[in-house]
Amino acid sequence: MVIYVFGYMAGIIDEVKTALLGHATINVMKILILEGIATSGKSTITESIKEQLVGLTVQTVSEEETHIPIMKQVNELHISFFKNLIERLAAEEPELIIFDRLYLTQAFRAGASLTEYSAIENLLSKYDTLTVFLEVDELAIAERVAKAAQHRDPSWGEYIRTKGTTDSEIADYYITQQRSQAKLLNTSTLAHMTCNTTQHGYAEITRQILKKLQM
């Protein structure tokens, strides 16, 4: 009985110390949102991060879930869509969720401000959320897209042709998108950072992201 009481009191004392000193360890789920134009390296960075976090529960969410289902509804905000997606995945309680695109891409497509996505940012603020914008030098975009079209599935080449009839027009579209999304991100209430992937320095970018996430 004496041992039990002593242990119980010791536990209370530790809790009081923690409350007073602020040393409580709270495991908050982390969310990483990768944004950037086509060919900016989102999929590559996702795989690189997964390789560095072997042993942790990492949930990756591709464009098949974040973008393609709403791709044809260009002018809509899709608030409910994003909210349901985030809540469904968060309910699984992984240690990290990595989104390949999310609402920033749709905000650009819809010509919306991030103020209109305040409900989504408020939801994401409950977690340790970081948005990383993968930027490509504008002079390199045309060549990068053209090379990707040669190696990717033919359907992807058909998709980018919806952005213009010539390589120059396609590059101009993605330059406009990149500039617009960068401006939008600067108005976000969430933590964010920009990484330049022009030189394909994915290992160093992965290191920077993990350091920012404290993982």
Image (cartoon, grey):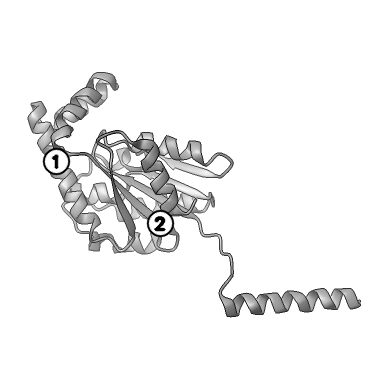
Taking the image as shown, residue 172 lies to the left or right of residue 210, namely: left
Q: Which mark is residue 175?
A: 1
Above or below — where is 163 with respect to 189? above
Specify whether 165 is left or right of 73.
left
Q: Looking at the image, which is closer to me, 115 or 38?
A: 38
Kind of residue at disc 1: Ile
Type of the residue with mark 2: Thr
Compared across the picture, whether 53 is left or right of 156 comes to right
In depth, the one of 173 and 84 nearer the eye is 173
Crowding at dot 1, Cα within 10 Å, few <14 / some 14-19 / many 20+, comes out as some
Image mark count: 2
Label 2: few (<14), some or many (≥20) within 10 Å?
many
Residue topped by disc 2: 129
- Can residue 174 be seen here? yes
Give me the disc on residue 191. Answer: none
Where does residue 20 sit, x and y in percent of width and height?
Answer: 59, 80
In which quadrant of the rendered view does residue 204 lie?
top left
Q: Which residue is found at the position 21% from the left and 51% from the top?
A: 182
Q: Secondary structure at mark 2?
A: strand
Distance in Å between CA atoms under marks 1 and 2: 26 Å
Q: Is residue 203 above or below residue 32?
A: above
Residue 166 percent coordinates (x, y):
8, 26
Quadrant where the N terminus is found in the figure: bottom right
**Apparent side of residue 83 relative to residue 95 in the rendered image (left or right):** left
Dot 1 or dot 2, earlier in sequence = 2
User: Is residue 147 shown above or below 110?
Assistant: above
